[in-house]
Image (cartoon, grey):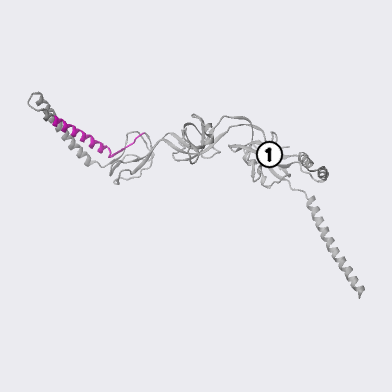
Amino acid sequence: MIKRFIIAIIFLIIVCGGIVGFNLFRDRAIEQFFANMPVATLAVSSQTVEPITWTPGIEALGTVSASEGVDLTVEAPGIVKEILFSPNQQVKAGEVLVQLDDAAERADLAATRAQAALDQTTLDRASVLQKRGVGSEVTVDSARAAADASSSQVLKLQALLDQKQLRAPFSGTIGIRRVNIGQYLSPGTIVATLQDLDKLYVDFSVPEQQLDLLKIGGAVRFGVTTDNMPFTGKIIGIEPKVDPVSRLVRVRAEVADADGRLSPGQFIQAQVMLPEEKNVLALSQTAVVSSLYGDFVFVIRPPEAVNGEAAKETKAGGEGKAAEAEKKEPEAVGEPKLVARQVFVKTGRRSNGLVEILEGVSPGDVVVTAGQNRLSNNTPVSIDNTINPANPAKPEADAK
């Protein structure tokens, strides 16, 4: 009985040992498989870091306005008798645009003019009689007062009659009419808009920190988008007061628009041009990745250079670890030609799709501009600049 029990225990130990051994062997095999598994080479586009001539600018959002623009309204109530303009018609200053019914005012004016003529005749006769010594001075004074009152009444009725006509206050382009013939208009009713499109203004605001960079006559570019700014202009006015709420300064620029592609009220991008700066390191904004730890780029380097950097980094942590790293590197099979190295950078100004690099990279470095989302530190890469966001028109040659 004891012998059978001992045999069962030995058999159980052999089975358990086999299971534990198999698990250890399997884990070791899996570990070796992943350790020796070749890393896939990822295709990325690149850009070579080179000093450029930097044209800094102050970017802002602006609104287009006409040099002269107004919503036309009537001063006196009345019924529309005539509409003497068409939409988008070029009108001249003083031209009659809308005629209200003025029959009653004309009749009152005619009666008042007749009375004024009679009062003037009475004054003339009283003056003649006074000179002959027949009339009194009181009679002449009364006749003069009546004549003056009648003349003033004529001017008043003429002014009221003029208010029955809506005239263009300046030359420009008139818009779509908002009234119809026979419609009763009350004072303040908008009839149409009148805009002088020969000269356009753009109003925009900049932060108070950049106020000292602005000057009258400074060049400004405009466009519907930041990628396309075909319009040019110059600063003609800077508000002398900073808005205490928004801390912004209002700026007005005059823009040239000979083709008539801009309209008052239109939203537009503005960029104040500043003096050029030479030998500035700048990269495409697509090359810079922002994270919680800071901005970084992926620099493409040969593995020898990366291994050298790793050796210097590990040397500070201990000579034994550095020796172990150097010993293991040559064992890699099918070592890639290029790897991507994560490098943190210090960025500066941004303009026209470029970002200024103050620290982190040097001229001649090759930086990844697309495909960073698939990369990690020391990932094998190959360069394919067929489609390069940094320079879509002229892709860079593949780095060797």
Total numbered badges shown on the rendered structure: 1
Q: Going 16% across and 32% down the picture, which residue do you hit? A: 145
The magenta stretch spans residue 153: yes
Amino acid carrying label 1: it is Val
Q: Going 18% across and 36% down the picture, which residue do you hit? A: 112
Can you say which quadrant of the picture contains the C terminus?
top right
Magenta stretch mostly in which secondary structure? helix
Judge left or right: residue 38 versus residue 199: right
Residue 380 drawn at (x, y percent): 74, 44
Q: Is residue 385 above or below residue 140?
A: below
Q: Going 83% across and 58% down the picture, which residue do you hit? A: 24
Residue 296 drawn at (x, y percent): 67, 42
Residue 172 drawn at (x, y percent): 38, 35
Q: Is residue 18 above or below residue 363?
A: below
Q: Residues within 10 Å of mark 1 (few under 14, many from 20)?
A: many
In the current view of this chain or complex, which residue is farthest to the bottom?
1
The part of the chain drawn in magenta is 141-170
Residue 4 drawn at (x, y percent): 91, 73
Q: Is residue 321 above or below residue 349?
A: below
Q: Going 42% across and 36% down the picture, which residue do you hit? A: 66
**Circle 1 residue:** 367
Judge left or right: residue 161 versus residue 61: left
Can you say which quadrant of the picture contains the N terminus?
bottom right
Q: Quadrant of residue 305?
A: top right
